[in-house]
Every structure is written in structure tokens, then in C-alpha cells.
Image: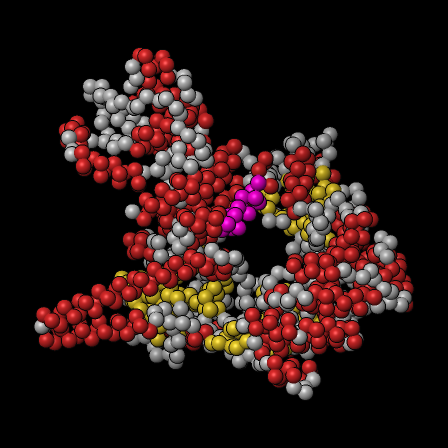
Amino acid sequence: MIDEWNSRVSISNLCTIWEKQRPSNSLSENLLFLLYNCECLNTHQADLDILLSSYLPQIVILTGVGSLIRNLPLLPNYYWLSQKGTNSFGGVAILIHHSLKSTIVYTVENFLLAEIDILSSKILVGAVYVPPNKQPPFEHFSRLNGKEFYLFGDFNAKHSLWSCETNNTSGSALKEWMERNGWEGIFPTVPTSKRSSAIIDFALTHNNSGWKVEVIDEGTSDHFPILFSSPFTAAEDGFFRKTNWNLFKFFLSLVNEYWNACVYNFDEHFFFTLFSSFLSSLWDRTSEYITIRKYRPPWPAYLVSLARSVNKHRRKYRRTRFLCHLNAYLCAKREYHEERAYYLQKKRENHLTTINQGQNIWRFVHNTFRPYTTSFRGIKVANGIEKDPRKIVDILGNYYEKHFALPIHNPNNVTHIKSIIAYEQISYLPNMPLPLVTLNQVEKQWLKFSAKKSLDSMKNSAFLLKNLPIEYMKVITVLFNKCASKGNVFEASKHAKVICLSKDGMYPAEDKLRPISLLPNLGKWFERCIHEQIQEWCKDKGIYTDEQSGFTPNRRLQSRILSICEDLRLTVAANNRPALLIFVDFLSAFDKMWYPALIANLVELDMPLPLIKWIYQWLQERTMSIHHGDSQSKTVKLHVGAPQGSVLAATLFRIHIHFLPKYFFRFCTHLFADDVAILLKGSLEKKLSQNIIELEKQAKIAMYTLLSFSENHLLPVNVKKTKAMLVHSAVSPSQPKIFFQNQQIDFVQHFKYLGVEIRVKLGWGSYIKTRILKIRNVYNALKQLFRQIPIELIHIRKKLFYAFALPHFIWLFMTWFYFTEIQQNEIEHLYASGLRIVNLVTIIHDLADNRPLTEAVIAHIMECWSRSLSYEEKSSQRHATAQPLMALYLLNEWFQSDRMCDLGEYAFPRLFVALFIRMASHVDTLPPQNVPPLSRIAPPTGSFRRDSTTNNANNASMSSATGANTSSARKSSSRLSIFDSKSSRSSSKASSTSE
């Protein structure tokens, strides 16, 4: 590389030489499952052919196969696994693509379970058909408990849990089974039967995270086909980039002086493009592309050789039956198992060492807790579904060209005229210098970067910039100051690479996609520095509103939720005083931000002209291109909106709607970014019916005001997603009618606002239940992870609990004081359960935190102890030591003795022993002084002896001194004294574990 750098080649040509093209591969597709009750395959084979050709699933589960189960049709690139049913309409079959290997695990009538290999993992996939009026085969389901499984089928079970209108016996039994065994469902949201509105075709699993489901309107059967998108990857020809980052950093350090000289001599726009291209090409030069198939095998070569040797000796012994050959076989087998066990042990130790270093633990848990977003595979068009990437980007390019087209303003609107005049006046101003950026500011924003690996339009990533040597901070500072001193924006940073995320399944319409802009990271770095200056101006001038909590420093989402809940609670405290809550949804709010209205707001807020001019320049001539797979759309110009993914865009949008609360000055409004809630309150002196009429009048005024704001800012309202809710404490009041532009707004019984579910009666049971269910799912995942993380790495176990479980409790804590005492106790119990999982404590009960019980146990222990002392000892020692500490000492003595407690009828449960041991685990102290030894007392006649019989006790006391000493030494090494220090306790625990 150094010779290539020193050759007489320009930087541009060198970048071209070093650039590597990523090997072409198919889109990273998720494994697709198709569930279909074909109602006798013999008569609906055409349906299956259509579904296979249109949706290309890798696995198809068919129920109700019928008589054709004995002679299934041959399909190209697929093979069958089948099991007959109890009647001519039963039977299940699994159709699997040839690229996937499978093994049948268990079969019974109408039930089939197979193990399928998916890349480097195996999953259990089942098919079941439950005839009508029959109970699900729970005796077969029990085989799946504690395993990773996915069970698909027609259950003929109805229950409100999966949105059925009625419940049947099978559905109630299935719900109870799921709750008892911790199963989860993957349920469609629309009916799966054409004959009713029931959902009877679905899937059951141990963990439904990452699964998406879609009901397809195809086929002639009386059931709809259901398409499941799994979190498993189906493509086998993927590639990943392996980079030598040490070489990358070392080479950049060598050429630092060159770039330090170039930044002073080159134009800032040219340097920006050249340096970005160099970083991208250097990344390619220090990287190689490796296919997924090149992962290391699970066993090393020497173990494979030993295994072959074992098989060789085994075959030889079976042929000859000689004793020498048997001994050779046994020796080889023993050697193989020993080496295999040693290899696994070393591998586990290396794994624990790795996850204990730095932030490696997050890579370990990524597959369990990774965020999941559906990747669309096609878009819906007028004549079906389009899956060709080239045509998809062309369709999306045309759609977004219209979506971001220049809006048409109203020349008769006074607000529009003022905005256009302010916008044109700013455009006539020359560029003005901005305050210079300091080295500390550049380094501060560099440290704030999240090390994401997604490539931007310049083929750089944030992770790449995080690997820049620290000496490049000076180069970057000089570059930013050259641009800031001229009031410019890097022209190359205005083009965005856009990827689209689906908001509606795997085959959404073109208007059901969320465009995410991947801007050049070097340009975003400069943008962050200028954004800091804008934030300082907002802070100095107080450019904030009390109603807005989004995109505002020192403003929390929780405060907005508490504010709206408290307003509702105080309003409906009287039975005759309801509250009308209108949740307004703006249509593509970020994408419809009108530039003249934004500039007019900035001018009215008296922002410094250099900053206004720079923002104007930042908004001009922005472009984007849609990327899907290896295809790229045409370049689309943006005449409205701001790129989603820019930190500056969020602040500009907040200023764009800064004057929204002034429009609703007579009402109570709550804002978080573009989420607006308008609260209308009834009068205390009026009847409920009169308040309803009054709220309807107020709603009419509020909708007229909303229409005025929408028209003035050219920000359309999505009426379909705008909802209203009448919050009250009455039984069944009438609802007011609300219209926006002659379209009626729907009323709802509950609405999820900022992650919290608000209901008409302000009840929290459903919200708590939903959140608790999520916490229990997290606990189940943590249990799986903790099997591989020993208790010695307690700091890692706590870190995972704080990262994935504690945030859910924080969400509940926001509305904690609105919960009932029973609900609070349930949440506290769940939190204590999490602590027990983390600390591997399974015998401590929640009663351990009960103070009256603790005092009662202490008194009981002291009474038992006093009965074993003589009169003189009682008088001298009873109050010599504090009772809690004395009780701990006594428990320690009993815990270290042969018997747990030999006090006859005064014996107490082991639970209390564990209770006080836990109490002492946080106290480092010495045992009380001058305490008489604990003497054994005989239990009263007829008392219950829980440890052993008297004969066994006598036999134990007659054991030899040598045996007693040996036993005592062994016990002293394995038992733990609660008065030992923390370090000694940990060492004793370690020795006990090893023993």
C-alpha cells in the first residue's frame, strides 16, 4: 500500500484502483412461511400453484389435505413431509424448498413435527389440524415445552385473545394452555375464515419477536392463505466485509501530514469529496469480502480426525471381535471424548472472556434482543405485486418526485404572502460567515456519533469515522471552519441515499413506506456543529413552548404524559364534567415542511441572519435517490420537507410548528414533535348532557382553528388517523359529533399516545397487563442468556437487566401514582422476580421484605435461644447484643451445624434462614463477643423432628474422631459464614462451587 501511495498516481486514480465492488448477491430475504387450509388439495391444487408462483415461500404448511395425502403432487424445487389425519378431510403436510434440509421428529394423526436446518441453526416447525368441536392435542404439544418451536395450523379455536368475536371451548382451553406454559401466538389481525369473522388459522411459538403476518386474499378454499415473515435469513449467498482496522488506522496516521497540507490548499467542496472518496477506497483496500459459507466449522480438524479414528476402530472390532481391537476402540473413544470435552471447556472459557471485555456483550445478545423492522419484498400496484428491484425503484422514484414537488400556495392567503416575502428577502442576502468551530466542538460531536455501519451516499459510515485517528480532528476542524467562514454548506452533503422501511407488511403500497435518508456522515458531522449553535441561540432566547416536549433539551416525554394524564384526571373528577381529547395526525409532517413558512418563523423569532441564511442554503437543491437491493432510482429533487435522519431537521420542524399553541390559545394542547393532542374541558356547573353539547361546539371551533393552521402552513391533516376520545366517569354518555372538512372523526375507547394507553375511564389495567407481558418475555429471554453467563459475571447479568427489563418498569413508573395498591404490588412482585433471576436467588420470597414478619422471626429466634441458656446466662447475656445481630449470629451457627435447627416444635422454615442470610450479605461485621455456645436441647415429647430420628442422631454422635474431623473440615470449606467479609464469602462460594 505504501508503494502504491508513493507511485506517481493522483488521489482520484488511486481511489479508483483501490475501490472494490461488493460481490453481487440476492436481497437479504427473510424466511417465509405460508399457512393454508386447502380444503382437500385434490380440488385446490391450482391455488397452491398460484401461491407458490406469486409469493415464493420457502416453507408451506398445508392443513386439510384430504385423500391426496397418500399421493402428493410433485412440485419443482420442493419436497414433501406429510402425515395423514383421522378422516378424509384431515391430514397435514409441509412443503419445503430443496435448499433447506429437514428431519421428521414426531408424527401422529393430524400432527407433524420436523427439524429444519436454516444456515447454522435448527428450528422445530410443526403442522397441526384440529377438527371442529375437538380439543387441541395438548399431550403432543407438551413435547415442545422448553424448546424453540413454531407450530402452524388450523386450530378451530376462537377466543378474544386473538380478536375473535366469540369464545369456544377449544379456544378457552388453548388460551389457558398458553398462559400456563408461557407460549406466545403469531395471530393475524383480520379473519382467516371466509365463512365467518373468526381467526382460527395461526401459529404458536416460544417467542414471537420479529414475526410478521399477513392474510392474503387468494384461493378458492373457505380459508384465506396466511403469509408469515420470520426473523430468520433465507439467503445463503450473502457476503460480509472483513476489515483490518489496525491497518486502516496505521495508514491514515502515515498520510496525516499530506491531508493536513491539502485542507489548506484545496477548495472545501473539492476536499470534502476527495477525502470522502479516499476514506471509502482505503476501507476497500484494507478489507476483503467473505461469503457466509466460509465460517469456521464447529469442530477443529484434529477432533474430526479423532472421530474418524474411533469409527475405524469400531468397524475393525465388529469384523474381528478380538479383545485387542476392543481395547484399541475403547482407548480411541476415551481419547476422543476427553479431547472433545477439553475443547468445549476452552471454547466456553474464551467465550466468557470475550463477552466480559468492553462492549462485546451487546454482540452476544443482539440476536435475542435485536430490533426488527419488516423489509419489504415488493410493492402493490394496480395489476398485482411488483417484485423486480429495478421496476420498484422506478415506481418509487416517480412517486417521491410528486411527493416532494413544489407545493402550490394560495395567493389570496395573507400568511402565505408574508411567508413568500420573507423567503425571497432571505434569498437575496449574500452568504454571511458563521462563528468558527472549535477543536473541542468537533471532537465532542465526533464522540457523540453512534458507530453505525450503514453506508451513506459517499460510501462512508459512522463506524468508519469513529476509527479516524485523533490527529485528524485538526484536519476536520480546518475544513469545517473554511466552510463556516464563507457561510456555505457542502454541496455533496445535500444528496441523500434513501432506503424505505415498510409500515404495512412485506408488500405495502407506495404510500405505506417510510423514507430514511442516509446523508454523508462527514456532512452530518458539520451539521451537528452548526446545530449546536442553533440550540444555544434557542436556549439564550427561550425559543421553547410549555406545550412542546419533543426535540427539546431538558424536556422529557414522561413529563408530557404526566401532564395530559393529570389534566384529564382533574377534569373528570366530577361526574358531570367530561373531557374531549382529539389526537391530531399530520400527513407526512416532516416531508411536508414548507420552506417559506419555516423561514418566516425564523425571521419572526429574530434568529441571527447568518444562521437563517445558512439554513436557507442547507434547504436548497437537496436531492435523493431510492436504493433497493442493488438497484438505484433516478435523482429526485426535494422542494419541500427535510430529510428524516438529520438532527437539524428535527429542530427545524419544532420551530416550524412553534406557533401552533397560539392558534389554540382557548384550549389546552399537548405536543410531542408532530403528535398533537387537543383537550376540551366541560363546565363544572352544567349537567353532563349540557356539557356534551358544549364540547361539540368547542370541537367545531377547534377543527376550524386546525384547518386554519393546516392551510397557513400547507401541512395536511390525516383525517383517517385523527381520533377523538370522550373521557368521563359516567355510565354511558352520548358522544359529540366532530367533523373536519366534512369528514367525521372516529371515536375510540382507548388510544396509545406516546407509548401509553389512555382509556375513556382512565383505567390502567390493560396498559399494565400489556407491559407486564413484555417484561415476562424479556425475563424468558434473560433466562436463556443467563444459562451461558455464570453468576460470577454478575455485573454483566445486571447490565442486561438494566438494558432490557428496567426500561419497561420506568415506563410504568411514569403513571405509578395512578395505579391501585394491588397493581403496584403486582409490579413490585415482578421487579423482585427479575432481581431473583439476575442474582440466581430462587428461595427468597417476597415476604422477606415484610418488616412485621422480620421482627416476629427475630423474636422467635431469641426465644428459642433463651430456652437453651441457664438462668445465669440469661440474665447476663439476653440483652448484651442487639437482637437482630444476635439472631443473625445464631442462624449462622445453626446453618453451619449438622442440623438446620434442632429446636423441636420451635423449628422455623428454611425460608427464614435464607431471609437473614440475605440480610447479612450486605453487612461486613464481626460476630458478637462473649456469646455462650449454643447447647443442644431435647425437643418436647411428641414434637415433630424434621431432620432425622433419634437413633440416627445417636449414631451420628458415636462416629469416630477422625471421621468427625474430616467431616468438619469438609463442612467448613463448603459452608458459608454470614459474618465473613464479602471477599471471603465470594472466595468460599467459589471453592464450594469447585468442590
- Identify which residue is drawn at 79% across, 76% down: 265
Instruction: Count every numbered label the image shows and give the total.
Output: 0
- Identify which residue is drawn at 9% across, 70% down: 323
Q: Where is residue 228 in the image (x, y as percent from the top left)?
A: 46, 64
Vertical position of residue 566 compared to residue 387: above or below: above
Toward the viewer: 261 or 622?
261
Quadrant in the picture for the N terminus: bottom right
781 on left or right of 329: right
- Identify which residue is drawn at 78% across, 52% down: 536
730 on left or right of 664: left
- Identify which residue is drawn at 38% across, 44% down: 987
480 on left or right of 125: right
Residue 69 figure quarter: bottom left
- Which residues lie in the magenta part? 799-813
Judge whether residue 810 is colored magenta: yes
Q: Where is residue 106 in the image (x, y as percent from the top left)?
A: 28, 63
- For residue 71, say whether it is visible: yes
Q: Position of residue 82 (x, y in %)?
A: 31, 69
Toward the viewer: 499 or 119?
119
Most frequent secondary structure within the magenta stretch: helix
- For residue 689, say whether it is visible: no
